[in-house]
Image: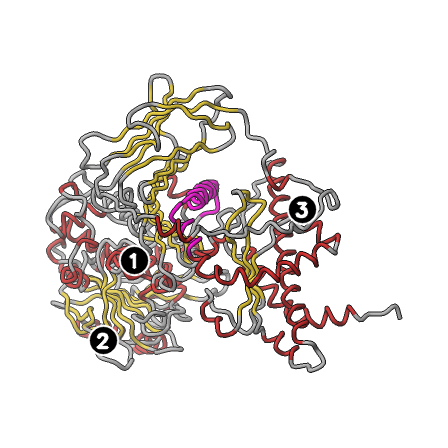
Amino acid sequence: MGNDENKALCLALIKADSEQEVIDILSNAGYWDNPKVWRYYGDYENNFNSIGNQQAHPVAALVEKIINSVDARLMRECLVRGIDPESEDAPQSITDAVALFFENRKATDSCMAGRIKNWDDHKRLEESKNITVAATGFRPPGNMCLTIADNGEGQSPAAMPTTFLSLTKSNKLRIPFVQGKFNMGGTGVLKFCGKRNLQLILSRRDPKICNSNIPSYSDWGFTIVRREDPVGNRRSSVYTYLAPIGAKGDHVSGDVLHFSADSMPIFPERNKPYVRESEWGTLIKLYEYATSHKSHILRKDGLLAPVDLLLPELALPVRFHECRNFSGDAASFANTVNGLMVRLSDNKGDNIEPGFPTSSPLSVDGQQITATIFAFKKGKSDTYKKSEGIIFTINGQTHGHLTNDFFKRTALGLGYLADSILVVLDCSKFSGRAREDLFMNSRDRLSNGPLRKAIEAELQELLKSHEGLRSLKDKRRQEELAEKLDDSKPLEEILNEIIKNSPVLSSLFMTGNRLTNPFKPKKVIAEEKPFIGRRYPTYFHVKGKAPGKPHQRECHIDMRCRVIFETDAVNDYFSRDTDRGEFTLEIKKGEEWCEIDRLLNLFNGVATLSFHLPEKISVGELLHCRAIVNDPTQLQPFINEFSVKVKAPATLSSNRSTKSNTPGEKKGNNREMPGGITLPNIIEVYEDKWEEQSPPFTKWTALRITNAGLIDNNEAEPIYDFKINMDNIYLKTELKNKKRDEQITKARFKYGMVLFGLALIQNNLQKQKLMSEIAATTSDDHDDTETNEHTIETQVEEMSQAFAPLLIPMIETLGELKIE
């Protein structure tokens, strides 16, 4: 085939929007059924083992393609300036590269440099036109095609086998300002590309950096990647790509097709694909891409939102285009993706609670992490996230996450905020080994190893002691329950009687211990003054102590040490982009000061430091510590020195769960039962309030519980609020029986559900206690925390829904059983 024929073939493949079209085009050209012209991807027959073990989610796989385009843009700008990307002259980070190449300044000139967060809308829009994602092809319920285009460095036809189509080459490993260093070429997308896993690649090297006199090196090269099923003695599939030029039929030789052209229409305009010409760059088309986000890609349930979340701090903006046949103005079919953090910053006042985001520096196993905590206003979080609660990022890309269920853990007691919190953990300062230990190479999920568990434990401590989150949780709970608590008192009295009259129930549950008023008095709330912090703090010292004056405190050898500081620093002091504060904690060993792991909570002028005492210390030992706070504007850092005297291990005598007042020892309803749990607040929910619940109730919902905290910070005594659906479909069906007394039937359903929920909670607490005891007495690595996928709240809601149709018939039928 000649130059014009190859160009026509390429244009036909670009415009094809189904796998069958591609197959027909290649069949007519004599390529599809000719095995001799297909070359192994990566020149490796068993490549399915590597390619098939990539991202588990199609959006995460797509993000890798976008990251590759960003890398290509940065690489082009570096090479055009004659800078060796691997040399010391090259930028040493992504922000350095963006500052130098797109702002014409060094990142060291200003902390605002190198971040698109600080660009105006016009600059973001113009730059986004150089990296685009276009949706074409089938409308729902069919799978759309996605085309990613950029005018980055591009590749020559001869270089494509060792770049786009390689698996093990170390192309970017030593380049500090790019992200795609695992050299899988974004192959994670292939398994989501229809049934045949077809992908088109078209690229041309920027003529300014094409260092070759060979004419074909400046051509456009293109190929199709496909998956071939196992045949004969080959037990697994194999990925191949079209390479007919000079092919010998051995599947490891042959070059891709190429043609000469001044430019190609690789970019979209508004809702029209493939109309804007480019003289160089890369186009990658994913045919019939299988993502659950099939609707208009710019809508709330479309593709843009999850991409935004997976790229919270994009190095360069990206333009998304919806080019399928949806009705509407063409202007509504394009939007710019700037990353979640930019979107949150631009719309902070309308969506984020006052005082947030807050920042917390922490270190785990010597690895530095910056936690940024967002608390959304009620009903606002679903615009930005779904089930994601904690996201782990490196250089602005999400590498893994924990779900909202993390906040429902018994030890945290943040159930009322579970859907309203987003924690962004910046792990960019991790060592290479730590990254490998925490993240899978696919960069879309976490490894389940010791480092992850250590980070989760520190996160749990951070969030549990966060004054801002605790105050917001109480506020949300009060808004939802305060006026209903008085109405629930008669229910408690009846439940107390039921439990008291049953020895078995009395042995399971504590009665009479519900906090009568868990909220601050209105007068106290009214007198609290809003905190107004300073961008550049003027003080940061231990609370109640004179600045700079050493003092001594005590700490049990088996507990965390806590120190509270006072400051006028704003809440995001340790996480903001510009003039970010730094916090370090050091312990003196001999004549040297050594940095140790710690976490710091800063909220409204109070900074709470928490850290474990070092290993190999003795009771009675005196540890000398100093906390240092600094930022680029301070002439001198804030230094606080203090000493910690090590005390004997803490005893459990004060633990309320160890009390064992047996039935009969104490008259009245306020006795405590061994190993019991506290009587919950019981709230009736009717259909007119279903939509106000989060998530909304349905006719099938029976019981929902929410962890509202701990009694005296004791994990053995969680506080739960119980919501009973009094318009449950099964209850309403039973009430249609005219022979039943309505009041008694409702009471049976209500109290039966409460006892059922209490039993499940008690069983969960006993299970956790047993697993903790096993872990303490064996070397097995047991995880005594609730799994992210199945918390006790989830168990209760699912099991009560299954139990609801049986409850009333079971009570009535079993109660009427006779000896006959």
Q: Which mark is residue 671?
A: 3
Left or right relative to 506: residue 124: left
* Badge 2 amino acid: Asn
Let me know if residue 669 is in the magenta part: no
Q: Residue 131 appears in which quarter of the rendering?
A: bottom left
Q: Secondary structure at mark 1?
A: helix
Residue drawn 35% across the image and 45% down it: 371
Above or below, 114 against 128 in this view is above
Q: Do the CB atoms of the residues marked 1 and 3 lie less than 8 Å apart?
A: no
* Image x and y of residue 379, in percent: 38, 64
Q: Secondary structure at mark 3?
A: loop
Q: Please provide the residue range marked out in magenta.
A: 447-475
Q: Secondary structure at mark 2?
A: loop
Above or below, 580 against 491 in this view is above
Callout 2 crowding tier (Cα within 10 Å): few <14, some 14–19, many ≥20: many
* Image x and y of residue 697, in percent: 51, 69
Q: Residue 321 appears in which quarter of the rendering?
A: bottom left
Q: Which mark is residue 582?
A: none
* Lower position in the chain sequence, tag 3 or tag 2: 2
Residue drawn 21% across the image and 76% down it: 272
Above or below, 54 against 804 in this view is above
Q: Which mark is residue 340?
A: 1
- Residue assigned mark 2: 271
Task: Determine the residue located farthest toward the top in the rendered image.
Answer: 590
* Badge 3 amino acid: Arg
The reply to whether residue 251 is visible in this rendering is no
